[in-house]
Amino acid sequence: MIVNVQETTEQQTYVDSIVERWCKDEDAEALVQGAQRLTRGEARQQLFRLGHALRGQGLEPGDSVGLFLANRVESVLAQLAVHLIGCRVVFLPPEPGPGELAALVEQSRARAVVTDPLFADRAADAAGRSAHAPVLLSLGPCDQQAADLLALAADCPDTRPEGVPALGPDDVATVFYTGGTLGRPKLAAHTHHLYKVLVNRVEEAPDEAQDEAPQEPAPQGFSNMYQGTDRVLVSTLLTHGSGHMTSVQAVATGSVLVVLPEFEPGAALTVLREERITGTMLVPPMMYALLDHPECVPGVLPELRRLFVGGAATSPSRLQQAIEVFGPVVGQGYGQSEALGIAVFGSDDLASEAPLRPELWRSTGRPIPDVDVEIRPEDGTDALPAMEVGEVCVRGKTVMLGYYEDPERTAAAIQDGWLRTGDMGFLDAEGYLYLVDRAKDIIVTGSTSDNVYSRVLEDFLLTLPGVLNAAALGVPDEEFGEAVQIFLATAEGSDVDPAAVGDAVTDALGELYTPRRTVLLDKLPTTKVGKVDKKALRTAWTNGEYDTP
């Protein structure tokens, strides 16, 4: 089959790299979900059919397409198909409420919304509220008035759609939802520069047919995490940065991508074993749940070569536990929707250097190539010296173009090319980055209104016997403005004494960090992406659900 890959380097996108991979060794596996297994040739043909089907709905290059998708093989292909035909991907994650979701669709000016049948009711409601009247498409039959995109694709050609113009350097390719206020979402807009960072070393990867012994990826940078011989599991949401990055990196290198529809530690362990997974990415609560599963013992995953942890702060004690269980394959990184890659601590370096310098367990690593990091005071532009805490500011190719259709917020977030991340941290003399808190999560308390960094407190709490997960919040206090309150998820059968926890905190961190109250729970609430949901904890506390005085 003739595949019309773009002829010049300037016109090539990451989708061209994927198509080129899927034109080689066409009978090799490409995408897997349970019993569903697509070869490279089948995946390429389905991608092209979906591209034609989307065009058949009147979509043109530059249009926005909202993707409200579950973790499925078809979701991976649908996202690639939107970029294949030169349209803009707008990820619609499951966490926003009806009003926020409708505002997201409206602000992004989506011409179409592609939904998983599971989300069809919510997608139809959001699309129906938009003045732009987007077309509603479903990945399979659903109860709403939506065209079945998979059925439409089945009748389309399996050749590449032609006539897609080259993207300009400032054309927005992908938009991520990143919170905001009710009815006014923040949408981080990225150009194709992001994908050049993610896959810019794909062409340097060895031909998998000649690669008898897979080489270890370099310890820094996201573009070389996987080799063409890897089998990669995506378990975080495909509509979030972590799942999107994992899936793109895997397929662009020619690796097999295995999709996990929903994370449950027992099921995840089974898939990791049976599919002989060599690489995956987890958010910290997922890794903790995996480590706490009774079947998760040293040697349980002998094929695993790369376990990347990111998306939220990771406990140093849990990182050490992960290396003890899985071996020296654990690395961690730092990024956010506004800058998907900032710093990384490669598995080789983490396993070899951190035991010699224990403080490195708390570090997110060094900035990735082509990214600069400075620590700045809240009201200044000059970088602070090493070891001084300030706001983490970033510039480089992974930084967003700005907030989509939101110049006011963009101007506040990006100043002279530097993104103000809202995270507080410091750099050491060797350039290792340490995060101490989100600016909004710092607890200001005590007679002198000092800062309590929730990350420092949570890391310590996770070292205590019987504590599986921890969250620290600042709650209103008449005397000091805020008081420290902690929430602990404890192991079944453990006897965690709140008073003893408070004493341990005081002994280790000082009286400023002593919790006013400790709440014991079976588990902490989490967001759809797997992070501890502090907003839910705060709401429950405010509503008196934890028997507060």
Image (cartoon, rainbow, N blue to C red):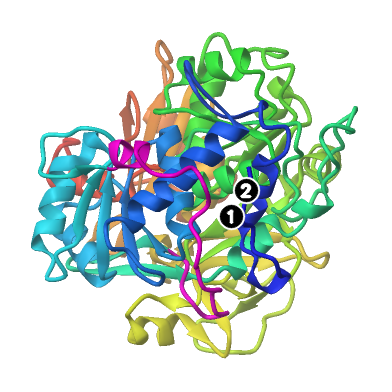
Q: Is residue 509 above or below residue 87?
A: above
Q: In the image shown, does 436 or 204 lie closer to the viewer?
A: 204
Residue 291 within the magenta-colored segment of the rendering? no
Gap in angstroms between the C-alphas marked 2 and 1: 6 Å
Residue 150 within the magenta-colored segment of the rendering? yes
- Percent x, y for residue 45? 52, 39
Question: Callout 1 environment at 10 Å: few (<14), some (14 to 19), or many (20+)?
Answer: some
User: Does residue 20 appear to the left or right of 45 in the view shown?
Assistant: right
Q: Residue at the spot x=79%, y=53% of the render?
A: 203
Q: In the image shown, does 48 or 365 lie closer to the viewer?
A: 48
Q: In the image shown, does 515 or 346 lie closer to the viewer?
A: 346
- Percent x, y for residue 127? 15, 57
Q: Residue at the spot x=60%, y=12% of the render?
A: 274
Check residue 15 in the rendering and tell me which mark sits there, or answer none. 1
- Percent x, y for residue 301? 68, 17
Which quadrant is home to the N terminus? top right
- Percent x, y for residue 286? 49, 31
Check residue 19 in the rendering and tell me which mark sits there, or answer none. 2
User: Does residue 244 appear to the left or right of 264 in the view shown?
Assistant: right
Q: Is residue 163 above or below residue 138?
A: below
The answer to whether marks 2 and 1 mark residues whose Cβ atoms lie closer than 8 Å is yes
Q: Of helix, strand and loop, which one carries label 2? A: helix
Amino acid tagged 2: Val
Q: Of helix, strand and loop, which one carries label 1? A: helix
Which quadrant is home to the C terminus? top left
Amino acid tagged 1: Val
User: For the magenta stretch, what is the residue range?
Assistant: 149-174
| Quadrant in the rendering for residue 521 | top left
